[in-house]
Image (cartoon, helix red, strand yellow):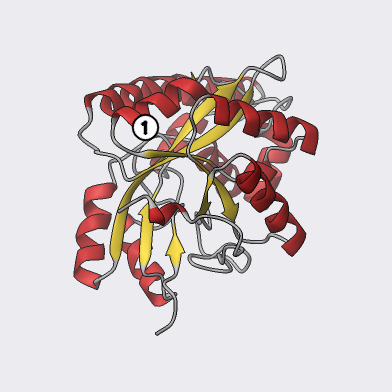
């Protein structure tokens, strides 16, 4: 019998993905995934739909969310993503935190639209909102800018307009990492440091981030993701072992593409402890 394929980090139209929760589950099944967690940005509205489809398809479903946080250590604050897995979605602490994050997301989305208006791109908020099934994110603005011909792809939209230092960038005042971890724990879940090598930091700073995460009682780190080299995976696995963190896996799937796909290349090294040993 072949080993199970886990994918514990993916997105749907409940945040900035392009497939509905049902479609995400079906695609995961087509790709051989046996255990799936939907982790939309600061949103759990897609969990019930995804769980219903997972039950229908006969695969295990784990409640997930990706919480946007700020790490203040580098000075001005850096956005870091903390994934919560296996929590109670009806937890009052989780409900309150996500409601707070939703307010921040709305404020940020409106401000981005106002900045685009000032540089000659009118009705951007309305255009981005038309592309979103829920909260409006920078990804929806990127798709809108592609749609109206300002850029040729999403990456260009971020590079020219939406990234830090660009004309339409708006910094968000997210919750701090320690609070996010505490809320995940209060809801009965495990807290995971998402994609640690994708924060555009030196290894020195990433190691400080991991140390802070451990100090704040974080549980796991994403060791396996799409598009990694063997050396990168071994590096993160080493941090997991050094800090006694559980090892998670996740494609961070948002839309169908060749290099990031549900269940693709998510094998863990032998020297780590998989997070599913603690998920039940």
Percent coordinates x, y for residue 66 in the rendering: 44, 39
53 vs 180: above or below? below
Percent coordinates x, y for residue 223 in the rendering: 60, 53
138 vs 51: above or below? above
As helix, strand or loop, the secondary structure at mark 1 comes to helix
Identify the residue at horizontal 48%, vertical 56% (top origin).
Answer: 274
Quarter holding the N terminus? bottom left
Mark 1 = which residue?
A: 184
Percent coordinates x, y for residue 76 in the rendering: 69, 15
Label 1 neighbourhood size at 10 Å, few (<14), some (14-19), many (20+)?
many
Identify the residue at horizontal 50%, vertical 59% (top origin).
Answer: 255
Residue 123 visible: no
Residue 181 visible: yes
| Residue 74 placement: quadrant | top right
Q: Is residue 77 left or right of residue 194?
A: right
112 vs 245: above or below? above
Identify the residue at horizontal 56%, vertical 49% (top origin).
Answer: 222
Observer-nearest of 183 and 155:
183
Observer-nearest of 228 and 14:
228
Identify the residue at horizontal 37%, vertical 60% (top origin).
Answer: 36
Q: Is residue 170 left or right of residue 67?
A: right
Quarter holding the C terminus? bottom left
- Pick out the residue farthest to the bottom: 1
Observer-nearest of 180 and 24:
180
Observer-nearest of 204 and 110:
204
């Amino acid at each position: 019998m072949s080993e199970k394929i886990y994918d514990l980090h993916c997105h749907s139209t409940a945040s900035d993905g392009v497939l509905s929760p049902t479609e995400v589950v079906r695609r995961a099944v087509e790709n051989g995934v046996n255990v799936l967690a939907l982790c939309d940005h600061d949103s759990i509205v897609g969990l019930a739909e995804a769980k219903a489809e997972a039950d229908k398809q006969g695969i295990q479903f784990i409640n997930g969310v990706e919480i946007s946080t700020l790490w203040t250590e580098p000075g001005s604050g850096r956005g870091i993503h903390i994934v919560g897995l296996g929590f109670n979605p009806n937890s009052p602490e989780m409900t309150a935190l996500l409601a707070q994050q939703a307010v921040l997301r709305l404020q940020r989305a409106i401000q981005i639209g106002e900045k685009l208006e000032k540089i000659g791109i009118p009705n951007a908020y309305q255009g981005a909102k038309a592309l979103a099934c829920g909260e409006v994110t920078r990804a929806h603005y990127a798709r809108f800018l592609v749609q109206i011909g300002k850029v040729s792809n999403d990456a260009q939209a971020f590079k020219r307009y939406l990234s830090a230092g660009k004309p339409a960038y708006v910094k968000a005042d997210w919750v701090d990492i320690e609070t996010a971890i505490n809320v995940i724990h209060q809801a009965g879940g495990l807290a995971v440091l998402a994609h640690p090598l994708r924060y555009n930091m030196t290894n020195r700073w990433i190691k400080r981030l991991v140390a802070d995460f451990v100090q704040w009682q974080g549980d796991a780190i994403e060791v396996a993701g799409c598009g990694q080299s063997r050396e990168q995976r071994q590096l993160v696995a080493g941090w997991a072992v050094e800090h006694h963190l559980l090892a998670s896996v996740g494609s961070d799937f948002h839309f169908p593409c060749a290099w990031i796909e549900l269940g693709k290349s998510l094998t863990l090294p032998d020297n780590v402890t998989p997070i599913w040993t603690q998920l039940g």
